[in-house]
Image: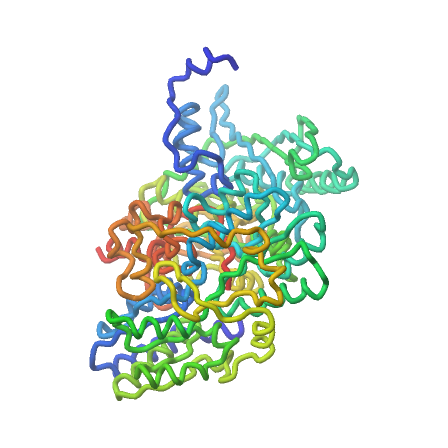
Amino acid sequence: MKYLDEYRNPEIARQLLDKIRETVTKPWVIMEICGGQTNSIIKNGIDQLLPKEIELVHGPGCPVCVTPLEMIDQAISIAQRQNVIFTSFGDMLRVPGTEKDLLQVKSEGGDIRMVYSPLEALKMARENPDKEVVFFAIGFETTAPGNAMALFQAAREGLNNFSEVVSHVLVPPAMQALLSSPDNRVQAYLAAGHVCTVMGYNEYFPIAEKYKVPITPTGFEPVDILQGILSVVKQLEKGEYTVDNQYARAVSADGNPAAQKIINEVYEICDRKWRGIGEIPRSGMCIKEKYAAYDASKKFNVSHIKAEEPQECISGLILQGLKKPPECPVFGKSCTPEHPLGATMVSGEGACAAYYRYQRFADALKK
Amino acid sequence: MSIDIINSFSCPLPKMDYNTIQLAHGAGGRLSAELIDKIFLPCFGNETLNLLEDQASLEISNNRIAFTTDSFVVNPVFFPGGNIGELAINGTVNDICMSGAEAKYLSVAFILEEGLNIEELHTIVISMKNAIDKAGIQIVTGDTKVVNKGACDKLFINTSGIGVIKEDIHLSAANLQPGDKILLSGTIADHGMAVMTVREGLSFRSKILSDTAALNGLVKDMLSVSKNIRAMRDPTRGGLATTLNELAKSSKVGIHIFQKTIPVREEVNSACEILGIDPLYVANEGKLIAIVPAKAADKILDKMKKNEFGKNACIIGEVTKEHASMVIMENELGVDRVIDVPTGEQLPRIC
């Protein structure tokens, strides 16, 4: 597959590993932001191939994982109503709310449909004028343009039976929040490649400067990730810190202006709770007043629903890179992909789920 | 059923993960296994059923008979490369012949939804006729029921079938021996991805076609060069990964496969990448896995390659003494990982 196979080339990967080994002299803690990168690292065993000096910690970049519990409860409240077709990305359906997940609502008779694009939900709204079609608009900057576009088109067509539950989050404020934490261990970031394709990487220069951390926008294949690691390790070893774009085949400094325009048309920045982390100021996006008629939280009057997270789940510490999944006492025991206690166990992008799938048997393999 | 009869069952209601049936109970993963282990086997279990093969091997008046049943509920009923009718024929033929049996007769039961277009039904029936002709078998009994609109999705089809197992053929998932080779008859994940590309909400244009095919001819060819095949399975629901896990557990051996040897069509691989789906867990409807003694492997492989349904056949790994009951895959970077049984259906990821 063009643009993929060459980035999975084992020979190039081995050469990069050699270069990383030659470069590194001291221990470094590097965080990959995106859950897609976490998944690739664990699946391909990159963490096992790196020299012991390099510790990868897994960041908060799993949109499903950080969607706050109360937004899931709000979504469930809407999805249980008569006359509603509730649409969502697939991996959101299994995320546990306080009492149940959306798939259980479906088994109880709720009309819940999985879509790959919000525009499919829009199509359902056109085809079912007597139903309320609601889309669960979650994600980072990556999914925001499509979600904004669906809402914009609905407004333009006057499709009054379409609305969105919006729980969008922004990456840079979370990166800053982690670096500001007194417990912070992160010394460099592999920035999330897909987010950067939309937003560019100009906004990272002030962060690199202020916190003196190298930031490298990085792709998702083994060669991408190893190039990203090599880039930050070189900087760390020299005491340098800048933004070095590894993912140049998809990312430019300014990102995608058309995508940014549609986001800014429909959404505005707001404070946002992150599951497991708590509220981060100005780290989310909400629907602008101009489009309030398409805001499902208002339309179905669910904004008052609040929820507290279960105590036993340490996903907050995992999303901040302070703990690894196997350090959690309930990992693989009372918390499994069948019965996740926290969202990091649900999504394929979640660090706990990745460890459960790919590393649960690591000890067996060593024997 | 009267209360007395209910009380006469000795099996108490087992503790289950869920109180109601979820779609994942039918996805062939861990929840399906729980349903079988806790609900069905305690009540129905016997020495034949307990083997959990895809078909029962029965001895009736000194003849060995393979007997199997399967229900087909695919949505949508027409998909690129086939429809529910062909699937219902080919699926049951394959379940019969994976025991090494020669498939002979099928039953067909239709559950039709009120309002189903007769022309659609006719199209499906014609493709079933073509499928039985191609497989060289007959439908010898059947049934039709019609249910209220909304009580099923257009139509469901159940097929059962029987075949005859020759005396010198003894295939079983429990037969695997360390050192055996694992043969795969062709590319994986074609069927599951073909269906997914036309599902409501996920549709996108692609050239992916279902691989639905009856494999009885291929099996016959393979058995003609070696009677010592240990086991055969068609990796349908749950995909290659699930089937290999079942084999490893049945024989209490390890299975070691190599990622680079597993063929996946480029367009299928692309669709999997886009949706975040692992092709190892995606359904196939015209592929088989055969576990064979190492010294017979090349001979069987050569024969497979000459059959239209085995052109892309290859050796993907071997059976090991280590890692009993586990499937290990070595990736292209040389790192091993465990290929586990999936929880339920894979859900396309958000981005």
Residue sitting nearer the eye, A59 or A151: A151
Residue sitting nearer the eye, A246 or B172: A246
Indicate the colouring scheme: rainbow
Residue sitting nearer the eye, B290 or B274: B274
Does residue B184 show up? no
Horizontal side of A42 relative to A163 (left or right) equals left
Looking at the image, which residue is at 31% across and 74% down? A179
Residue sitting nearer the eye, B140 or A207: A207
Horizontal side of A79 relative to A318 (left or right) equals right
Picture quarter with the C terminus of chain A: bottom left
Q: Indicate the quadrant where residue B91 lies.
A: top right
Looking at the image, which residue is at 43% across and 83% down? A245
Please identify the residue farthest to the top as the structure is shown: B4
Can you give x and y, in whole percent of width and height, for residue B74 in the image?
A: 61, 43
Instruction: Classify B133 as above or below A47.
Output: above
Can you give x and y, in whole percent of width and height, for residue A229 in the image?
A: 34, 77
Please identify the residue farthest to the right as the structure is shown: B119
Instruction: Classify A298 as above or below A245.
Output: above
Can you give x and y, in whole percent of width and height, for residue A114 in the image?
A: 57, 52
Q: Indicate the quadrant where residue B267 lies.
A: bottom right
Can you give x and y, in whole percent of width and height, for residue A153 in the image?
A: 67, 65
Does residue B135 show up? yes
Looking at the image, which residue is at 67% across and 38% down? B132
Horizontal side of A327 relative to A200 (left or right) equals left
